[in-house]
């Protein structure tokens, strides 16, 4: 695994910006010289259960282990109301689980980084299944690159977002996007959760990400603070996020169904068969 270094968020973001620029100009040079640019496929699954999405990630990660030629993929989706916790809290949340399930939400302990958070309708969840060796990124720099994607996406809506000493993306003192990843043998899973028009009342039942003095926000909530009545939906945000994901990671994104090569056709078949179960 790559070595990681403890850096301030500003330093990490600067490194990732440099990497992103390098990848971008490499893509631009390939376009000028006629060298094909590698497409990064994505798929939007609408709303599926957390358990099903978790099993799908395990399947795709296992496929990457078994077949080095299989494609990178960005899974985009929403979940029904679900609380999850990260690996540091496994086995410590039995009382929380009973309480949260009574609210009508699902609850799962996971192997991602981070602590307890909420997923639900109106939240754009992204699970990149990537081989970090394809992007020459360390784990910490990968997280910072994800943060940069989210910051750019927020900026596209006129919302000034930033990083802090705490992981994730923030608007002032309010967290707009949680990030928790898992990396196994260079292959990533889990990812990010950007609040678009999420019901933020769900977060009142937990200490989001273990930060007692912090609140959550959303794109729609930030508009409401300015007196705007616009509701920003997940479906509206997807094209913007994909554009910035492609920029930062140096590979243009395209819907999986529109990518015409053998590996991606096989991947589409796997997804179709899995989602029918």
Image (cartoon, rainbow, N blue to C red):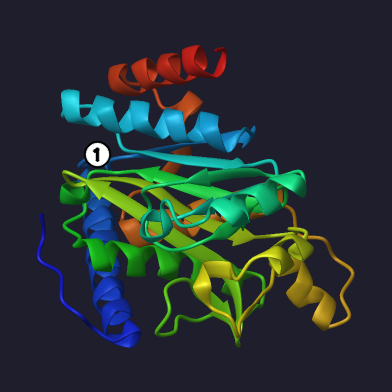
Q: Which residue is drawn at the image coordinates 42% and 63% (left, top)?
A: 114
Question: Which residue position holds label 1?
Answer: 36
- On screen, 178 above or below 169? above
Instruction: Place residue 260 in its image quadrant.
Output: top left
Q: In which quadrant is the C terminus drawn?
A: top right
Q: In which quadrant is the N terminus drawn?
A: bottom left
User: Farthest residue toward the front?
Assistant: 95
Q: Position of residue 266 (x, y in %)?
A: 35, 16
Label 1: state its secondary structure: loop
157 and 163: which is toward the camera: 163
211 and 24: which is toward the camera: 211
Q: How many marks?
A: 1
Q: Position of residue 248 (x, y in %)?
A: 36, 62
Q: Which residue is drawn at the image coordinates 42% and 73% (left, top)?
A: 167
Lateral position of residue 59 relative to residue 205, left or right:
left
Q: Position of residue 91 (x, y in %)?
A: 42, 51
Q: Which residue is drawn at the image coordinates 89% and 80% (left, top)?
A: 227
């Amino acid at each position: 695994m790559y070595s990681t270094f403890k850096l301030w968020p500003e330093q990490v973001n600067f490194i990732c910006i440099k990497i992103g620029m390098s990848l971008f100009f490499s893509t631009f040079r390939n376009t000028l010289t006629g060298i094909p640019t590698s497409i990064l496929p994505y798929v939007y699954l609408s709303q599926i259960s957390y358990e099903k999405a978790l099993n799908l990630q395990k399947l795709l990660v296992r496929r990457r282990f078994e077949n080095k030629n299989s494609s990178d993929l960005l899974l985009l989706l929403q979940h029904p109301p679900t609380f999850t916790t990260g690996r540091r809290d496994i086995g410590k949340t039995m009382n929380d689980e009973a309480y949260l399930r009574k609210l009508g939400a699902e609850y799962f302990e996971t192997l991602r980084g981070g602590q307890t958070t909420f997923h639900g309708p109106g939240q754009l969840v992204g699970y990149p299944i990537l081989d970090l060796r394809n992007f020459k990124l360390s784990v910490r720099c990968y997280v910072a690159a994800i943060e940069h994607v989210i910051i750019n996406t927020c900026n596209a809506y006129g919302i000034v977002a930033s990083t802090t000493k705490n992981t994730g993306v923030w608007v002032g003192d309010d967290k707009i996007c949680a990030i928790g990843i898992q990396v196994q043998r260079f292959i990533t899973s889990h990812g990010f959760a950007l609040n678009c028009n999420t019901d933020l009342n769900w977060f009142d039942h937990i200490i989001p990400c273990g930060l007692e003095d912090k609140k959550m926000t959303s794109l729609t909530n930030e508009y409401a603070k300015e007196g705007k009545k616009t509701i920003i939906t997940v479906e509206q945000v997807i094209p913007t996020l994909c554009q910035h994901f492609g920029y930062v990671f140096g590979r243009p994104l395209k819907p999986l169904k529109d990518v015409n090569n053998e590996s991606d056709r096989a991947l589409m078949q796997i997804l179709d068969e899995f989602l029918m179960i």
